Image (tube, rainbow, N blue to C red):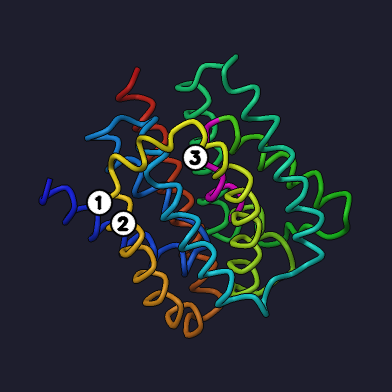
Amino acid sequence: MLLLLLATLLVAVLAGGVAAIAGFGIGSMLTPLLALSYGTKVAVLLVALPHVAATALRAWMLRDAIDRRVLLTFGAASAAGGLVGALLHAAASSSLLSVVLGILLIFAGVSGASGLSRRFRISGAPWAILAGALSGGFGGLVGNQGGIRSAALLHFPMDGRAVVATATAIGLVVDFARIPVYLATGGGEMLGNWPVVVVAAIGVLAGTLLGGPILRRLPEPVFRRSVFVLVAILGLALIASAWSSA
């Protein structure tokens, strides 16, 4: 147990720092680690409270940079798309969906990091709503919205700090919507494994505080390339996970 708590703390600090810089990463990094000991279903529950704690702190730290127009268009459509995707999840093959989303994330990451997608920009409410609905839908289907949300937001005319702030605000809305459901259906699991939840929360909060100053000093081209690379890595991880569980 002590070894698990130590590993959870270290990964949580790293995940919190990555999320503070890129706008995603806590669920993507912590869930696979805890799934080794508890299974994916319980791991999702255990990560939920640390995730919302770090997301709320990050949203407060970046509150002045949130693009409210993007939040109300892309964000609202993303939340709705995520709900539809989650409802369709039970009727589709999880492994196949993970591979499809993984391929999309790799394509988005490689094209963004190489500059191929540099001219593609999302502007206007209709396009923002469409992009939000598609990214939320794909994220809801496989239960991982952060990477694809950030990849889409990078194509809006916003600087890096605004991208992370807006992605964080959208993620917080999603968290507030799902936390009551998790508490109602898995509150016992959370309470029974409270040491892991507490250690993970401490780690992601510490990582968030450490990663914040890095984001402020990161040059814009480096920020965008770094996020696109992380998106591609997430895509590879999704495909590897689907392959191992097949």
Q: Amino acid at mark 2?
A: Val
State how far apart marks 3 and 1 are (Cα).
17 Å
Q: Position of residue 170 (x, y in %)?
A: 65, 56
Instruction: Give the magenta range.
Output: 142-150
Q: Which mark is residue 25?
A: none
Q: Earlier in the sequence, mark 3 or mark 2?
A: 3
Residue 189 in the figure: left or right of residue 74: left
When the figure is inspected, residue 35 is found, relative to residue 18, above or below; the finding is: above
Tags 3 and 2 touching, CB below 8 Å: no
Which residue is labeled 1 in the image?
Answer: 195
* Residue sitting at x 61%, y 69%: 165
Q: Which residue is mark 2?
A: 198
Question: Badge 1, how many Cα within 10 Å: few under 14, some, many 20+?
Answer: few
The three-letter amino acid code for the residue at tag 3 is: Leu
Residue positioned 40% across, 76% down in the render: 209
For disc 3, the marked residue is 183
Q: Which one is earlier in the sequence, the residue at label 3 or at label 1?
A: 3
- Which residue is rendered at x = 39% and y = 26% of the image? 242
In this view, the residue in front, 84 or 135, is: 84
Q: Position of residue 161 (x, y in %)?
A: 59, 75
Q: Are marks 2 and 1 in contact (CB under 8 Å)?
A: yes
